[in-house]
Image (tube, grey):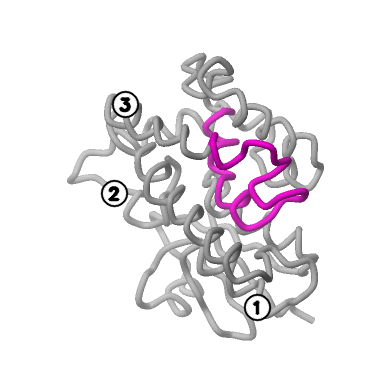
Amino acid sequence: MAKEVKLFGIWASPFIRRVELSLKLKGIPYEYIEEDLSNKSPLLLNYNLTHKKVPLLVHNEEPMAESLVIFEYLDEAWENNPLLPHDPYQRTMAHFYAKFIEEKLSRGIRKEKEQAMEEVQQLKILEDELKGKQFFSGQRIGYVDIAANVLLWFHMMGEITGEKTLTTDKFPIINGWIEKPLKMDVVNECLIPKEKRQDWIELSRKVAGCASNDINLRDHGENYLF
């Protein structure tokens, strides 16, 4: 019997992998379907007529896109292992910081390097938010931490290329936060295996250098790579 939850994605995207992380943290069984975004499957197109992008989650034949939207849906549809706090104020602030990360960091990473460096200075705000906490969500990983999963990938890219923006001297608290999820098996399951990371770097650079008249993969997936 097929699983009632399907996730369509691409192996190289942190935004698909963070949806996988939310599914695993909540203990939700799912079927993962790898897509070729230059030749999308009829199944993906059938479910996703409006957006035609990934991540796409299908639950009981009902499709939804955008990773932050998916996180919230999963938390409402499955009450176990909540990702969002119950307190209304804390819940509101979790939405605020997740949106902040999405707008100020995730989009900034995809700009030219100089512009991205300016955007990354927004990390100082996240430094302040993390002071005195194990995770953004308190004592355990939650909604904002999953949204901030892109920081792990940013850190991973710096480790491979040597071009480190998230240095310990500039962002000591964020670096301390990065170490905590990386010690968790469930998080490492949702990162690219070490043997494929060089391929990921090359693909990232290829996507970043796409000419306007080429197939621009960034238009086909939610925040495709960086």
Residue at 72%, 39% (x, y): give it: 181
Which badge, 2 or 3, is on the more N-terminal residue?
3
Residue at 61%, 66% (x, y): give it: 7
State the separation of the CA atoms marked 2 and 3: 22 Å
Residue at numbered disc 1: 76
State the separation of the CA atoms marked 1 and 3: 38 Å
State the separation of the CA atoms marked 2 and 1: 36 Å
Q: Secondary structure at mark 3?
A: helix
Residue type at mark 3? Lys
Q: Is residue 51 above or below residue 182?
A: below
Q: Which residues are magenta?
A: 127-156
Quadrant for residue 90, please give it: bottom right
Residue at 29%, 33% (x, y): give it: 209
Residue 105 lies, in percent from the top left, at 42, 41
Q: Secondary structure at mark 2?
A: loop
Q: Quadrant of the N terminus?
A: bottom right
Residue at numbered disc 2: 215
